[in-house]
Image: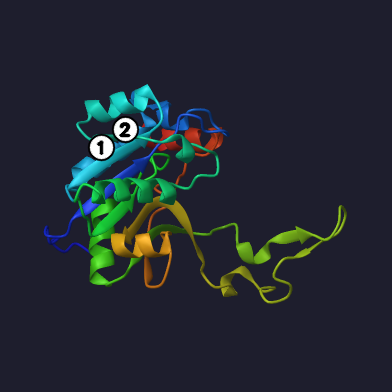
Amino acid sequence: YNIRIIMKTTCICIIPSRSNSKRLKNKNFLKIGGKYVVNYTIESAIQSKIFSKIILSGDCKLAEDIANQNNIDYSNRPKHLRGDYVSSTDVCLDIIQALEDKDNYFDFCFCLQPSSPIRDHKDIKKSLNKIKLTKSNYLVSVSKIDPHYFHWALKTENKVNYRMYFKDKYMKERLLLPTVYRPNGSIKVAKVKELKKRKNFFGSKTTALLLSPEKSIHIADRFDYIMAKSFLEL
């Protein structure tokens, strides 16, 4: 999708960061290659040159300092958006509403999780090109579910017995199974009007951008962090 982007399209980039992550404490502010994890996403967003506004959403002084150092906007999360069960979509909608109240309007909203530091500016530009070329309302980055096929998932009937979750439908050789994908959390894009209507980054007319396994690494625990370090510090 190496087609020149029409710059009349206005895009906002929202990078939702938290300081109180549970499984891996302060994962967005750990260091890799001498930089904070969140800096990789900020730099990729800036380098893509497609955004009229880039906003780091945070809840701590360090996040605000990082935003200021990179000359991007900072949005301090209100208390009701700091809980464990608050979604990144809620954060994006809150920021968009605040901006629209000040007569700032955008065609597309990009939600770039800082915990996916290996995707780069080229992937971000490809996302915009693809959602426009396919005339889709939404785009999500995905990776293949391989080699851990969900088709063979087991579930417990009790403490002892297990059975195939999908029963006999997929009891066949691996080569005969259909290819399936999973959203990897790296890139989410939505037309702003659709995002406001559906309050979700998934809906009718969703397309996908396939990313490589390494670009699909999403830092949720220490193992993911070590994997990301191994690629970024090569």
Find residue 39 and name its label.
2
Q: Residue at x 46, y 40 (%)?
A: 81
- Mark 1 highlights which residue? 43
Front-most of residues 233 and 25: 25
Whether residue 120 can be seen here = no
Find residue 110 and name its label.
none
Q: In the image, residue 182 lies at what x, y percent?
A: 49, 59
Type of amino acid at the residue the image marks with label 1: Glu
Asked if disc 2 and disc 1 are in contact, CB closer than 8 Å, the reply is: yes
Q: Residue at x 74, y 72 (%)?
A: 167
> Which quadrant is the C terminus positioned in?
top left
Q: In the image, residue 12 lies at what x, y percent?
A: 25, 50
Type of amino acid at the residue the image marks with label 2: Asn
Q: Is residue 125 above or below residue 205?
A: above
Furthest toward the front, the residue is: 101
The secondary element bearing badge 1 is classed as helix
As drawn, is 49 to the left or to the right of 180?
left
